[in-house]
Amino acid sequence: MKHYIDFINTKNLSKNKLALGLNCSIDEIRILQYLSKCLLDNQNNFLVSSVIENVFKAKGAESTNYLKHIKSLLDLEYLYLTNDAGANDIMLLELLNSYISLTPSFLKILENGKSDFDLPNIVPYKDDLDYLKDEFLKINLLQKLAFLRRAEKSNSKIYIDSENNLNSITSCITKRLEITTKKINILHFLKPYMLNKEETIIFFTLLKEEYYAENERMREISTLIELISSDEYSKISNKYIFDEKSKLIQSGLIDYDEDILSPFGGTINKSFYIPAQILQKIIYQKREKKSQKILIDSIMKNQDIFELITPKTNLKDIILPSKTKEVIGLLIQQLDLKVVNLLKKWGIKDNKRGIDAKIIFYGHPGTGKTITAYALSNALKKPILSLDCSKILSMYVGESEKNVRRIFDTYKNITKDLKKDAILLLDEADQFLSQRSVLGNSSVDKMYNQMQNIFLEQIEKFDSILIATTNLLDNIDQAFSRRFNYKIEFLKPSIEQRKLIWRQLLPKKANYAKDFDLNNLASFELTGGQIKIIIKNTAYKVATKNKPIFTMGDFTSEIRKEIDSNFEGVKSLGFLK
């Protein structure tokens, strides 16, 4: 950490080695130095107006003179906006009341004392994933050059360095391919299309977005054109790549949605993507799957909060009341990308947000809330990060507030490392969503209220899909209830639904006694979760018999145990023999 200590302690920034390598003005370096010092006090989220006041002693109208330095540092990607606004879209005056943080790439520079660009070794490529890492690194550099051109820094040292790095990685890819004997499937796949340099860049940029889902703006025609164009003339000449008759579109390698239209029907913008059938051919290779599994295992081992679930449950296999299934189906339709884009066009949904929703599943235990969340995840093609809420409550006052923040920080870190969005599932979230104490006199009340306030704040900022399951909707604090835009009730199954559940869960290859009566079993007011437990417990008991045959007595004895242990006082409608 020598470079970091030297940087925050130096009084003459014009002679500091790390500062000289940043290619910033002295005022911009002063801002970075101040923010870097604040890291020692565990701060990395700052109001811009406060930063300007602390660094330059400027207030009010005078502080606007320094906003250009904040904008410059955002363009250089040394800072990022923590309120999810796009650095390209924001106006200077908007910055004054925005929050900023140091980027991971700048923190890496602080730690290493130099840029985080590392040229790969000239060795043969091991597989497609190894090759794509280099291509994606090249795309990152092209993005940086586009940012710098837009910020009118195309004559700066950092622009020249980035251009040199781009040439180096391009040369490196060529040399590595020359000594690679293994077949690189994606190159073999693309060869018949004979794409030119610009077309290839566009394809790999969209492929990178399919892999990592980092920035939806990288799908927009204006951003893609900037990526392959060095000036205004080339921007005009490169538009042919996105025409209906272009090679990329005609061949089906890429496609687009017309997500923003003018009042007269003309297309203002297009959002491009790689069709599923193309992705199927180039992404899902066995080796890549193995590498991905190793990566996922490594990421999940580094935390102790979430379980990563990739469900295979289908909604059609879940027995629910028809009304509940209808609402779930409508929810899936509303989370479709085309619907989201249409809502953006109408101004109903913020253009800067992607597919997001906050959902509550409520109802009695065992009515299918969790398994429906799994099925919804499968339908949306998103994994689930499931939280065991009991892990968050701490014995020590004050620790739970930290743990609430940790939930959302860890979620962000995992999804960032996985390079994919995931549904956040808060199972049995009653203790987080319950009504806050009005008096709050005791230390425990204060701790719980503070914990819930932080939880409320984090839910407000959450911009992906969150599902919370709870047993009692009436106990939910109104402030939480307002934050959830979907509330779906799960009722206990009717007698006909219970018959279907019994029939679906009973062992198909087992032997049943003559007294077995499905109608009698279905007459007991049980939930699907209870039926599943009863069948499992009965099977364990029957499996120990000399003649393993299921009788009604086996089932009814387990039903009696389940009902006796049920604190809700469930009454049976059937006749226990």
Image (cartoon, rainbow, N blue to C red):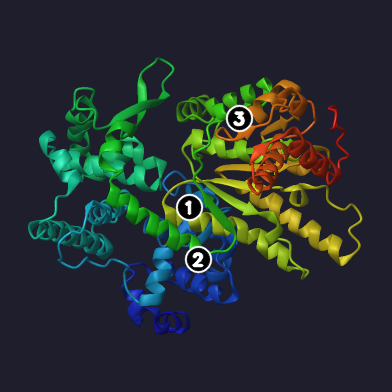
Q: Which amino acid does the dot numbered 1 rest on?
A: Thr
| Whether residue 251 is visible | yes
Name the residue carrying label 3. 504
Residue at image coords 75%, 68% = 398
Q: Which residue is mark 1?
A: 415
CB within 8 Å, label 1 to label 2: no
Which sits earlier in the primary sequence, circle 3 or circle 2?
A: 2
Position in image of residue 266 (x %, y %): 36, 18
Check the image and name the residue furthest to the left. Answer: 178
Number of the front mark, 3 or 2 = 3
- Rendered residue at 48%/50% (across/down): 92
Which comes sooner in the sequence, label 1 or label 2?
2
Residue at 31 percent across and 46 percent down: it is: 208
Residues tagged 1 and 3 counted as in contact (Cβ below 8 A): no
Residue 91 location, x and y as percent? 48, 46
User: Quadrant location of residue 296?
Assistant: bottom left
Which residue, as the protein is rendered here, is positioned at the far front? Answer: 546
Image-quadrant location for residue 512? top right
Asked whether residue 476 is in view, the answer is no
Q: Quadrant of residue 330?
A: top right
Residue drawn 31% across the image and 69% down it = 115
Q: Secondary structure at mark 2?
A: loop
- Local packing at callout 1 (Cα closer than 10 Å; few below 14, some 14-19, many 20+) is some
Horizontal side of residue 285 vs 414, given as left or right: left
Residue 191 or 464: which is nearer the viewer?
A: 191
The residue carrying mark 2 is 302
Tag 2: amino acid:
Asn
Q: CA distance from mark 1 to mark 3?
A: 35 Å
Name the mark nearer the viewer: 1 or 3.
3
Of the pair 513 and 311, the residue shown nearer to us: 513
Front in this rendered view, residue 404 or 280: 280
- CA gap between label 3 and label 2 equals 38 Å
